[in-house]
Amino acid sequence: MPKVKLTIVESRCRDGLYKVGDEFIVDNTCPPICHELWHDIYPNVYVLLNGGQLDCGDERVKYFSHRCGDQGRVLIKGEVIEE
């Protein structure tokens, strides 16, 4: 079963929750990230955990990047990893 690695690429989190380089591995439980960010990225994580691919221009890929809804203070990258 694939897993998704989430990596914090940029962080200006107003609550100081994340540092650049923080990583979280998602398999079948929610990672310890704020509910607002999780709510935003969960649909992409779900697709990747279930073997799907996401649109990226003209390509289909197994990764995404997303800025949080709080003025884009956090940039997170998600990618499939096989273990």
Image (cartoon, rainbow, N blue to C red):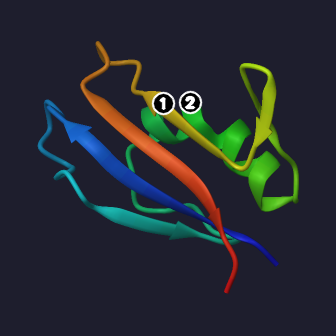
Query: As drawn, is 71 to the left or to the right of 3?
Result: left
Q: Which residue is at 34% across, 34% downward?
A: 75
Vertical comparison of 15 with 26: above or below: above
Q: Which residue is at 70% across, 40% downward?
A: 44
**In the image, which is nearer the foreground, mark 2 or mark 1?**
1
The amino acid beneath tag 1 is His
Comes first in the chain, label 2 or label 1:
2
Q: Quadrant of residue 80?
A: bottom right
Q: Are marks 2 and 1 in contact (CB under 8 Å)?
A: yes
Residue 15: x percent and y percent? 14, 38
The amino acid beneath tag 2 is Asp
Query: As drawn, is 65 to the left or to the right of 23?
Result: right
Vertical comparison of 35 with 69: above or below: below
Residue 6: x percent and y percent? 47, 56
Q: In the rendered image, which residue does mark 1 sit on?
A: 66
Q: Residue furthest front?
A: 58
Query: As drawn, is 46 to the left or to the right of 35?
Result: right
- Crowd class of label 2 (few under 14; some 14 to 19; many from 20; radius 10 Å): some
Q: Which residue is at 46% across, 45% downward?
A: 77
Q: In the rendered image, which residue does mark 2 sit on?
A: 40
